[in-house]
Image: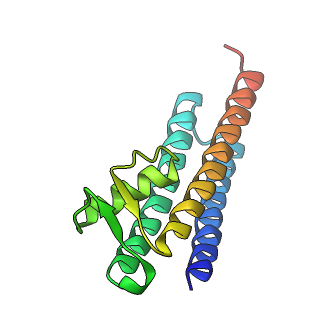
Amino acid sequence: MVCLLSAALIIVTSATHFEIMTGVAILRRRKVLSKRAEMVVFLGSAFVAHLFGVGLYALAFAWMHYHPEFGSLAGLAGSNATDFFYFSLTCYSTMGFGDVYATGDMRILAGLEGLNGLVLIAWSASFTFIAVERIWRDDPK
């Protein structure tokens, strides 16, 4: 069950990220935005895509936490939305402070979220580099 949930989350977060980045690229090709506005929209969109992914994982952690057969969160965590979001954010960004940790099968999802987040953050960074390079190449002023 955990592997199926992990696969679904990886697919949904990657597809969402792709669609958001594609939408921004379409705006760029249409030259609807100024250079500054384009970068603000692009970086804001990437940030929203990442927060969406973190939120989905937080929902999965909350669901698993309330079904003890899948494990739970331990450490300083309570059981409110902020705690699940915090844990998800530390996993996604691979910071992993250690004050909150997963137990049981939930550990697998936490580890895979780190891999998923690492790939998506790197993807956003490379996409940002390409976008900035194109902006400067098109109009170096």
Q: Nearer the viewer, residue 55 or 69?
A: 69
Residue 74: % across, % down: 32, 64
Query: Residue at point 39% right, 49% down?
Result: 98
Residue 22: % across, % down: 68, 55
Q: Nearer the viewer, residue 98 or 52?
A: 98
Q: Nearer the viewer, residue 62 or 68?
A: 68
Residue 70, picture quadrant: bottom left
Query: Residue at point 62% right, 68% down?
Result: 10
User: Is residue 127 shown left or right of residue 89?
Assistant: right
Quadrant of the rendering where the N terminus is positioned: bottom right
Q: Nearer the viewer, residue 2 or 57?
A: 2
Task: Classify 112 as above or below 6.
Answer: above
Query: Residue at point 46% right, 61% down?
Result: 52
Quadrant of the rendering where the C terminus is positioned: top right
Residue 33: % across, % down: 57, 38
User: Is residue 95 shown left or right of residue 112?
Assistant: left
- How does the figure colour the protein chain or chains? rainbow
Q: Furthest-right residue in view?
A: 137
Task: Classify 109 as above or below 18.
Answer: below
Query: Residue at point 69% right, 41% down?
Result: 127
**Total marks drawn?**
0
